[in-house]
Amino acid sequence: MNASVNVLKEGYSRWMQNGRMSANGSCTLIKSSGMYILVDTLGPWDSDILRALLQKHSIHPEDISLLVCTHGHTDHIGNLNMFLRCKHIVGECLYEKDVYETHDFEQQPYIVSPNVRVIATPGHTLSDVSVVVENVDKLGTVAVVGDLFEKEEDVNDASIWKDAGSESPEKQESNRATILQISDYIVPGHGPMFSVNRS
């Protein structure tokens, strides 16, 4: 059975005066094997927006089967408390209510369904994860990567992702290369989904 990927809200980032940045992360809905998986939850001031985005797909917060936040920055985890009936993966932490599960994302992917897996992609932070979705109708393999990629433009301009902050540029560069090899499309943290150009 095929999976679907819908970017509910495209992330953005813009430098402002005095070294400040206006930014919010992408928010993506995945459907696979009868489950709804939400990746990143926008910022804490966006709960009404997120609820409305889900409602457009006739989905309520309690319908989400798994919540994945690619890393722990506020613009990606701002509405965790809307989703209290499912397991949460935040970076490499996996928990539900007050129970933490151990899973070594560096050693093996976390399998969500036959088409969906969560993999370690450290770099932007040391505990970043990405969600790889295979067999997506008309798209192939889609990777939802948080800030591993800021936006499409940073594929050819490393200064964009480096200036946005990287706890390990070497790991980030390596994991970016892996994602480019295995994906047909990428949902970055702060821009529209883009196709991978292998030429």
Image: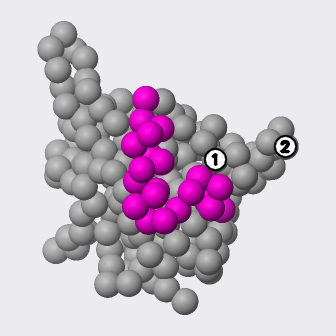
- Residue 154 position in % (x across, y down): 21, 47
* The magenta segment: 45-67
Main secondary structure type of the part rendered in magenta:
helix
- Residue 147 position in % (x across, y down): 38, 44
Which residue does the numbered mark 2 point to in the structure image? 99
Q: Is residue 10 left or right of residue 98?
A: left
Which residue does the numbered mark 1 point to in the structure image? 83
Under circle 1, the secondary element is: loop
- Which amino acid, mark 2? Val
- Residue 128 position in % (x across, y down): 52, 44
Q: Residue at x 61, y 80 (%)?
A: 33
Residue 19's quadrant in the figure? Answer: top left
Which quadrant of the figure contains the N terminus?
Answer: bottom right
Mark 1 or mark 2, which is nearer to you?
1
- Residue 123 visible in rendering: no
Distance, label 1 to label 2, CA atoms, is 16 Å
Under circle 2, the secondary element is: strand
Q: Is residue 173 above or below residue 36?
A: above
User: How many numbered callouts?
Assistant: 2
Which quadrant of the figure contains the C terminus?
Answer: bottom left
Front residue of this view, candidates 50 and 147: 50
